[in-house]
Image: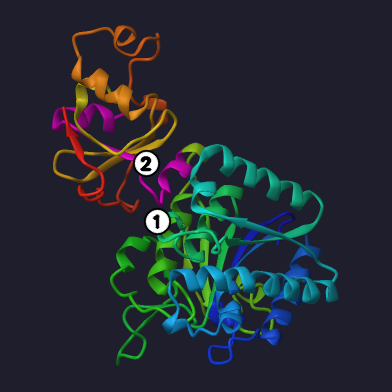
Amino acid sequence: MSKKKRIVVKIGSSLLANEEKLTLRYAFMNGLMSDLADLQSEGCEIILTSSGSVALGLNMIGKRPEDAGLLDKQAAAACGQPLLMNAYRQVASEFGVEVAQMLVTVEDMEERRRFLNIKNTMLRLFENDILPIINENDSVATRDLKVGDNDRLSAKVAQMVEADHLIILTSVEGLYDRDPSEEGAQFIDEIEDVTEHLESTKSISELGSGGMLTKMLAANMAQNAGVETIIAEGIIDRPVSSVLNRERRHTRCLATGKAASPLMIWLSNRLQVAGTLVVSNAAVGPISRKERGLLRSDLVSIQGEFSKGDVLHVYDEGGDELARGLTNFSSEETILMARNPEMEIEDVIGYKTKSAIIGSENILILEDHHLQLDAPENADRPVISL
């Protein structure tokens, strides 16, 4: 393996916690940490994205996974996270590995400055040969402010640090073309376009918040960032290095060509919508070809309250997502400019600035291999027609 290969490893709750007793599986943790220690000694930089805090904390609050509501899970996460990190620290110390904890929310990952701060912290930990263990801060995250699952969190982390590999360890060997319990189900060794395999991945585990579908969504995010994803069974003996060296069966999702710029990758993998713009069909061509930015004259409607620098999702009049980009204006300023097309922008908003709502340098045009987001429902965010 080449020196300083960067690897993100994601561990699911079903591997870390016994499903019945909701206690730690120390045998797996020992096998994992032994393997990661060997990889570190070979010069690899590793980030561990670990679930498990909710599962471990449920015993303390007297709840079962199937009965726990959102508040129960938040409380369980607060109880279980110290247990999880203490276990990791104890096991890691046996193999000479130093670990650090990082808890994040979706806002941390999708607000540009926080995103860069997290990245810089991880890079500094790498410089000191410390293994970051990252998890979503489930004790404070709500349904509306969640990355949603640690599969996609791990993909965003892989994107963030420009990893070579994202390895998702789970309770199965990899992806099948249908439910593996069905007769004739075929194992898939290699995938070039993840979007072609989403329909066959609908199941979910008791302890986890995702199933194979979320792993495919994560793989798509990683593909678009130039990161290869490996989905494999979380065995005890050398669970990571054995798939890196292709010693056992797994599903490998190939990166889609050369990675785009860090800004374009960050724009592509959005989990929340700050606001949406609908542009006229006449504007779709010039914007798609990046001949110019998105102008106020292009706008058909606006939805959501947003601030300067937020990421907006751009749709055509048919409801298909066209692009994502950083806005130069707030929603209030955008509405004023669009409703007063005959006036100079300086006269409308009170200061001199660029004329484009989103500049061409800050627009990502979505391609077939990007997963599009449906436009948000109108009930909570009224559409303002222009």
Q: Give the quadrant of the N terminus.
A: bottom right
Q: Quadrant of residue 82?
A: bottom right
Depth check, front residue: 190 or 210: 210
Amino acid, disc 1: Asp
Measured along the vertical axis of the image, is residue 368 above or below residue 305?
below
Q: Is residue 21 magenta?
A: no
Residue at 62 percent across and 58 percent down: it is 103
Residue at 33 percent across and 54 percent down: it is 371
Depth check, front residue: 50 or 197: 50
Residue at 70 percent across and 47 percent down: it is 121
Q: Is residue 198 visible?
A: yes
The residue wearing badge 2 is 274
In this picture, residue 56 sits left or right of residue 3? left
Magenta extent: 264-293
In this picture, residue 126 sits left or right of residue 141? right
Q: Which mark is residue 144?
A: 1
Instruction: Give the SS element for disc 2.
Output: loop
